Image: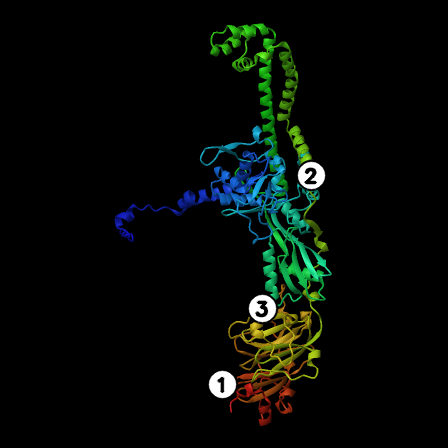
Amino acid sequence: MAKKKKTPQPVTPAVVAEIRHQPITETVEKNFMPYAMSVIVARAIPSIDGFKPSHRKVLYTMYKMGLMSGPRVKSANVASQAMLLNPHGDAANYETLVRLTHANEALLHPFVDSKGTFGKHFSSDMDYSAPRYTECRLDKFCTEIFSGIDKDAVDFVENYDSTTTEPVLLPVTFPNILVSPNIGVAVGMACSICSFNLAEICDGTIQLLKNPNTDIERLLDIIRAPDFPSGGSMIYDRDKYREVFRTGHGSIRVRSRYHYDKDANCIDVLQIPYSTTIEAIIKKMVQLIKEGKLKEVVDVRDEIDISGFKLTIDLRRGTDPDKLMQKLYKMTPLEDSFECNFNVLIGGTPRVLGVRELLNEWIDFRVACVRREVRFDLNKKKDKLHLLLGLGKILLDIDKAIKIVRETAKEQEVVPNLMAGFSIDRIQAEYIAEIKLRYLNREYIINRIKEIESLQNEIADLEQLASSETRLKNKIAAQLKEIKQKYGKPRQTQIIGVEDIEVYDEDDMVDNYNVKLIFTKEGYFKKITLQSLRGNDEQKLKEGDFVLSTIDASNTDEIFVFSDKAQVYRAKVSEFDTVKASQLGDYLPAKLGFEEDERALAVLKLEKNYAESGHVLIFFANGKGVRLPISAYETKAYRRKLTGAYSDASEAVGCVFVNQAERPIYLVTSSGKAMVIDSSLVPEKATRTSQGVILMTQKNDSRVVFVSDDPARFLRGDKSYRKNKLPSAGTTLDTDDRRRLPDSIQDCLTP
């Protein structure tokens, strides 16, 4: 039986009166800000120890489970145990654990020794196995992050339900904040910290410990560049790297490393940038292949196997692999940028710091940890000395001590009687009372008392160490040297100078050969090789279409396409496939992405130098014309589309291009009038939006419908149509010349 729905209570004025109207500022302060701070402090931003809270909680859980030694345990066990500190669910804990493992390859120095499938950082599709199938334990490297944690090196706080405690920070013995990469997105801020080589970071930190005023240039020579777990080649620009080093902001370019297999004619990409994945690279390459922009590639495939990363690119015969890689670096994520944002929690406050500032903050943190460890050891030794001093007093009369214990009537009175008999305090008396009877001999007591002098010397040394920052820093420097020798690895990321980078030039990738460019009135465009044209000059056209212009060009040239919507489209001849005369060719509006109802008017071949390209003459339906320099369309950056190419006050009918030599222009109106003028009669204007001057006067509804720069093609002779003074009404076309016009133009003429 279905539940009966409750009828909502009407909102009466009395109910509305009870609703408290909360100002937006109060809402933000009481509701949003606590949430934002929680995400910043407790989730997304790492602290000076180099860990986010989730990482710290999982690692400390494993430490308390005794996983620094012994066999591996199921990851499910770790993920569930970590919920005592991180109650976001075992799935979230397991995801955190995965990134810390050797198998995932996300870190230069992983913290978890793993067994099983943990996915790969360089693949978004390669999933990790369920936690019940994988095993883990702490790597030996973790001795450097837990050193001193049991000696009061860091503060502890209660967990979320006050059932146990956890460390606020881990007492890392090296600057993990710059060794382990970290990326996080909080509320209103984010962090993106790249990794550096452990040996270089240790050397740089030692240099700062010795000389806190070391300048950035010196540190740049020591900490040469970031070092990513995925390898690759960093394009080293010292000025940009200095900015990252100084401010913590900037961009680092990394490109893939590859090997060319000559026998198989394929490129094997072996390392990729840390900030991308193999799926993103393949997706982009497949897209370029479909668009016809990557004709040099036959196939691309993922060949990752047990031996490691491998992306294979099969090449067409004759392709230069090095030039192709330059093209792929430009067009795909095979070269990518790591955007740096060194945002770190310092004392619970997010701060963006440069490398030197981060190292100085870590040094302050580490000095405090070591001082606390020293004081812990100092207190332990003082306590031991205190006990031994009490033991020394009974050496004077062991029989008296035995007599006091034997003659004491009640057990609880033994300690007070010893205190009174030897003038010692309760702690010393408790210690003496607990000594076994077999040890109450002179030899044992004398041997123990001999430790007093060495303990006093050790205590004096520790007190001096705790009060001397110089000695503490020397101790830290010695630890860093040991860590470098023990765990240092060669660089994974190669460094290449920006001056050694070959600039990608698209023309180098294009075969250069002579072609004929055919453009028709209906907007079809053909690129035909001269060899294909031999003995076959007849062009296939749509019914009613005709060739508007034929251009001699090379495959590396560029063209301008003028449209009737006052726009110019720029394209490379190499972007078009070669066709035969028997084919229609490419429809320019579709190929170049024209707007709806936009038509192509003319095609211009661009010269390398805009100033040498000459002029474009644009003719309008109202009889006006204008001459504009091609240099007016020059832009600083390569632009595929340029709006406002000419005046849109009247419909553009045609365009004619003139270089150094002037040429005759043939104009026809809908009233059947025509004239031939020299292109030099059209005056030049400085601005593209100029409406031009009247060339051919119009009456009634007459309009210019046809323009050509080849009058001989449509006229038996142009003498009767020649005009040397403008404006002119033109001359009526005779019957034969009228018939010579294309059918589509004849249909526009009045009978």
Residue located at (64% from left, 25% from top) = 465
Instruction: Choose between 186 and 293: the one closer to the eye.
Output: 293
Q: Which callout, 3 or 2, points to the residue nearer the camera?
A: 2
Q: Which mark is residue 701?
A: 1
Residue located at (55% from left, 51% from top) = 127
Which badge, 1 or 3, is on the more N-terminal residue? 3
Label 1 crowd bin: few (<14), some (14–19), many (20+), radius 10 Å: few
Residue bearing the label numbered 3: 641
Q: Amino acid at mark 3?
A: Lys
Q: CA distance from mark 1 to mark 3?
A: 33 Å
Which badge, 2 or 1, is on the more N-terminal residue? 2
Q: Which callout, 1 or 3, points to the residue nearer the camera?
A: 3
Instruction: Choose between 334 and 415: the one closer to the eye.
Output: 415
Is residue 618 something one can see in this rendering?
Answer: yes
Residue 486: x and y in percent read: 68, 37
Q: CA distance from mark 2 to mark 1?
A: 86 Å
Residue bearing the label numbered 2: 203
Q: Residue pushed farthest bottom? A: 735
Reply above or below: 103 against 620. above
Circles 1 and 3 in contact, beta carbons < 8 Å: no
Which badge, 3 or 2, is on the more N-terminal residue? 2
Q: Amino acid at mark 1?
A: Asp
Q: Amino acid at mark 2?
A: Asp
Residue 446: x and y in percent read: 64, 12
Reply above or below: 363 against 622. above
Residue 326: x and y in percent read: 68, 60
